[in-house]
Image (cartoon, rainbow, N blue to C red):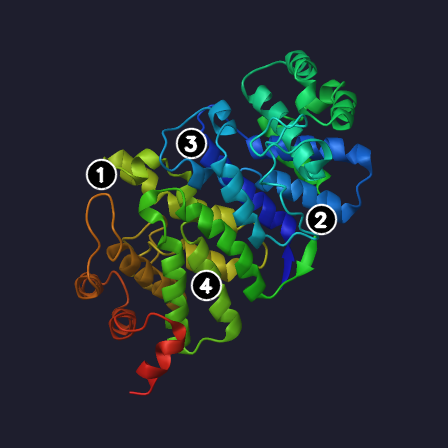
Amino acid sequence: MKLNVNQMLLSFSFTLDFVERDLLKDVTNHTRHVAYICARIAKLTNLPEREFFDLVSYALLHDNGITRSLLDRNPVDMAGLEKNIMHCEAGEENVAYFPFNRPVPGVILYHHECYDGSGFFGKRGEEIPFYARLIALANRIAVDYAQGNTPRDILALLKRDARLFDPELLRLFFHVSQHGEFWLNMQPMFIEPELERLLPQQTREFSFQNIRRISRLYSKIIDAKSPFTGGHSRGISKKTGILCRYYGCGEEEYWKMRIAADLHDLGKIMVPNEILDKPGSLTREEIDVVQSHTYYTRKALEMVQGFEDITEWAANHHEKLNGKGYPYGFTADRLDFNSRMLACVDIYQALTEDRPYRMALSHEDAVGILDTMAKQNLIDGSIVRDIDAVLGTVFFEEDLKVIKSK
């Protein structure tokens, strides 16, 4: 399909911003601010368009490792994150899945390096990749801005700490930021449209198999948000793949379902960790927050043209055949087979995982619960029977021949 990479990136920044609001209570629009600042400075360097697109992409992805790096910590301020090397390491690993025009090693890993060599890894000067030097400067400006500093304050702080930044990039920033419009564009109502205006349009041909490399980036970030969901999306994607092969799905449908499985819980990024990880019963208000996640999954994926089927299958995984699911209350006539399949696999995976409030259930116990739900007209009984027959013994797609030979 022809994938508009801009739409994918902006969908990602939409969700990542919610991670930062949850983990970093003093931050809003941080990724967009960093990307905008990088773009404005880079416009003065005459970067070729494809490299300019990669730079802004790296800027939007620069903090993608924060979910994994802060799993064992309480929410912190942005200054606390700056001292956490793990988000650089996790983020560098994650971006290997993104289709840059020309990948540059070390951009995310070294985006907190200082020009004078005083960063995490001791890199200095032009040992630090150009994109990383620019992101480091933009990141500092965005943090100072988020902390309520005025433009004059920010310029003064940068002059004081000039040794930390590439002097040429610092000079370009002083030039581009001298007029009020630069700062006015940073306001919440203007930052996204301004970033869209700056970012060159890139539509590229991808197979759904290759698009799944991108969806795996998302799923790693989703699963890393909570220690209790560490392999949830991966597990669902694997089991969905097994069932798709069992049902004889075509290649395009197979890969679209794997992508939908990767992304089904994308909206959970918007749910605070204190609710996701709560060991006791949730209040009615907390349940409402958790149940909103499928709505946000739909809204994020709707940003990407060509993802219409994927959006439906991913966002319908908590709908029920009798209309008592959420968030839309769809009934059986509105739920196609693949939506039903993903809903069943999601429940099965959740039941067979450890959670804050219980240990993982066995295959037999999980299927027993699924069977009860099917009798209540909540989920599809035929798919439950197939889950029992297949997922109890098949752990890899290549082992399906054993089942099919019987």
Out of 354 and 162, give the one closest to the viewer. 162
Out of 203 and 209, give the one closest to the viewer. 209
Position of 291 with respect to 7 (left or right) is: left
Q: Earlier in the sequence, mark 4 or mark 1?
A: 4
State whether residue 336 appears in this view: no
| Mark identifier at residue 258 | 4
Q: Quadrant of residue 192?
A: top right
Residue occupying the far bottom of the picture = 405
Q: Which residue is mark 3?
A: 23
Report crowding for label 2: few under 14, some 14 to 19, many 20 or more residues within 10 A (C-alpha): some
Task: Tell me the amino acid under the disc marked 4.
Answer: Arg
| Mark identifier at residue 340 | none
Q: Quadrant of the N terminus?
A: bottom right
| Mark identifier at residue 279 | 1
Relative to 168, does residue 214 appear above or below in the rendering?
below
Residue 80 spot, x, y in % from top left? 47, 25
Relative to 22, does residue 347 appear above or below in the rendering?
below
Q: Earlier in the sequence, mark 2 or mark 3?
A: 3
Marks counted in the figure total 4
